Image (cartoon, grey):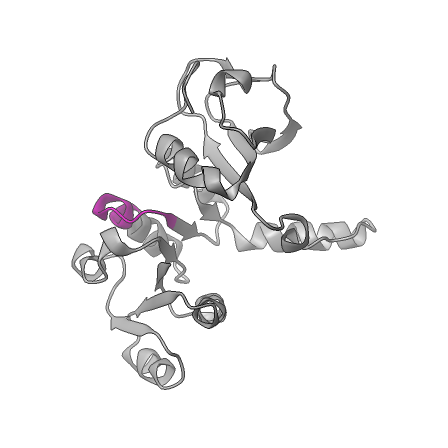
Amino acid sequence: MRIVFIGAGKVTIGTARELIKKGHEVVIIDIDKARIRDLSEEMDCSFLHGDGSQPNVLHEVNPEQTDFLFCLTDNDQVNVIASLVGRSLGFKRVVTSIGDQQFEGICHELGLNDTIVPSITISRYLENLVEGGENVELSTVIKDEARFFTFMVKEDDLFTATDLKLPAEAKVICYYRSGKFLHADDETIFRTGDEIVILTHSKNLPQLQEHWRQKPPAGNSTG
């Protein structure tokens, strides 16, 4: 796969190193020329000096040939703008990192469904420690060809999990309403603003992404 990172911070560098080891093509964009110079001496990937939120800069990394665009600068506004620009340029998958949780709802309203909030992940981990729970790494649970897929309900029509007509080896397992975790079954009625979580075989991801990254779900959809 071909992956482009905006922002050469610790998360980018750590992730990029692992992806490079696995044979993926990596491109890192950053506005700090000295940072790029230093990293280029030790990392086997491509670098581009510039503002990753600018269309002319993102054009240079061939959006149509890129599988993921990760917007990981330390500025939430830059990440959101870069994500919107990246989506408009045709990047296949855009992932947005935000530090301020108040931007999460805005990102979902803008259709940036692949939004991560690092502080929330850390907070949940620490909460589990205090309550005596065992923190399980996601990688130990989602093995082999199992994958998660999520999407936001954007239409006013009411529908159930059965109406989604998901492909074989794909099932709705839970959903979030106003940020609250709720279990789901075949008769659960979803509504606008719900975030639906699907557990699926990896082979179904292209079909799910094509359907729900491009248009909102509707009752009696073909999945």
Look at 23% across and 62% down and name the residue there.
61
Q: Position of residue 202 (x, y in %)?
A: 50, 43
Look at 63% across and 50% down and name the residue there.
143
Look at 30% across and 55% down and name the residue there.
66
Pick the residue in front: 178 or 72. 72
Q: Position of residue 198 (x, y in %)?
A: 55, 34
Specify the quadrant of the image occupied by residue 41.
bottom left
Specify the quadrant of the image occupied by residue 63.
bottom left
Q: Is residue 104 left or right of residue 179?
A: left
Relative to 197, does residue 8 appear above or below in the rendering?
A: below
What quarter of the picture does the N terminus occupy? bottom left
Furthest toward the right, the residue is 132
> Where does the magenta region start and end?
84-94
Q: Is residue 159 left or right of residue 91?
A: right
Pick the residue in front: 194 or 127. 194
Q: Position of residue 105 (x, y in %)?
A: 45, 37
Q: Is residue 214 left or right of residue 105?
A: left
What quarter of the picture does the C terminus occupy? top left
Q: Position of residue 82 (x, y in %)?
A: 30, 53
Specify the quadrant of the image occupied by residue 25.
bottom left
Furthest toward the left, the residue is 56
Look at 28% across and 45% down and name the residue there.
87
Q: Is 101 within the magenta? A: no
Relative to 201, does residue 50 appear above or below in the rendering?
A: below
Number of marks in the image?
A: 0
